[in-house]
Amino acid sequence: MPTAYERTRHGPEHVDRLRRTAADEVARTGAESNGENRCWCAGPGDAHRRELIELLLGSPYDPDRLRKAAVRAGWQVPRTLAVVALCRWPVPARRFLPSDVLTGLHQGLPCLVFPDPEGPGRRSTLHALLADDPGVVGPTVELRRAGSSWRLARRGLELLPADLLARHAVVHVTDHMRDLLLLQDPELSRELAARKLAPLQRLRPARRASLAETLLAYLECGRNAVAIAARLHVHPQTVRHRMRQITHLFGAGIDDPAQTLDYLIALHASRLLPDDRSAHYRRARPDDTARHAPLGGLPRQQVGVTGGSRHRPPRKKQRKVTTHES
């Protein structure tokens, strides 16, 4: 699965080049900026700011050392902050930052420390800063947990699907905690999905997708056909018809509260992590749906399954008898 790095053409193979060039870029950016919009960054020519970044993100929390480093760097210590993992070093248009924003490198990767992210207007300010430079925003934390915000932001940048940043330049990791849990161990997530959703694997892709999204909505909408229909933009009768098929495939287990969480995890994992075994199964059994008995006990023409009508020999065309022949 391509990552956010790959989407921006700065994949893992580009990290080494980032390490060699980003520090020089930071130093140059800091030298060019000035006034209230000067770039507060950690570069080779600014040991105080480099120390401040390391104290915030890397070292064990030491409030006294942090306070002294902030004084030396001319940085006002905030109550809360969020760390942003950047896909690339900010382009020149983004080098002029608010005076309280820190940028720099940590562990060889570009990052941004954004104080007081929950304050009035701060979220829009952050989104404006990152509009052209995609990044993943870590959770808002107190200073002593700044390293945690950085680690979660970096993990989100490494693991979240590429199309997520294609749709949203700024991704908040707190909106995708569940996905990160599943992506942290993809092998385990795929195995659970393969086991719990095995009954769907004998269906064609379109039917499998529609039943999977219906089952997910069924579990998340309190098993209410009207609510499910509104979510899926289909008729309630369509939902009931699909649920008869799902019950036929899965049995009563889908209504067992003890299994609900397993099914939810499996369904979300299957959307994040497609399993190659599914494609192999489809190649081995290309016409499996047509061979199986009608789902829900209904005739095929009623459930809309193609290829199930009985073969009938063509009728013989009767020759019209003329008056002369009779």
Image (cartoon, rainbow, N blue to C red):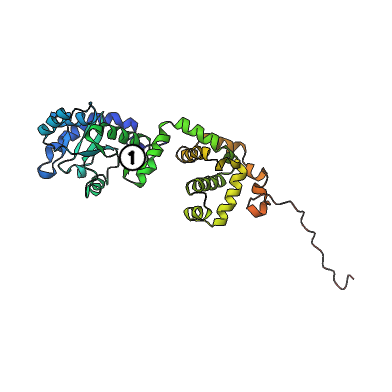
> Label 1 is placed on what type of residue?
Val
Please, which residue is most extreme toward the front here? 257
* Residue 169 located left or right of residue 21: right
Examine the rendering and report whether any part of residue 45 can be seen.
no
Name the quadrant containing residue 255: top right
Determine which quarter of the picture holds residue 293. top right
| Residue at which label 1 appears | 173
Identified at 24% across, 28% down, the residue is: 58
Q: Residues within 10 Å of mark 1 (few under 14, many from 20)?
A: many
User: Image quadrant for the C terminus?
Assistant: bottom right
The image position of residue 1, as x and y in percent, is 42, 36
Q: Who is closer to the viewer here, 52 or 130?
A: 52
Q: What percent of the width, then of the height, locates residue 128?
A: 24, 48
Please tell me which residue is depicted at 39% across the width and 43% down the height of the picture: 163
Residue 277 pos. (x, y %): 54, 34
Camera-side residue of 125 and 311 = 125
Residue 161, percent from left and from top: 39, 39
Residue nearest the observer in this picture, 289 or 267 = 267
Q: Secondary structure at mark 1?
A: helix
> Residue, x 27% and y 40% (percent of image)?
140
* Residue under the point 33% across and 36% down: 157
Q: Taking 143 as reference, is 318 above or below it?
A: below
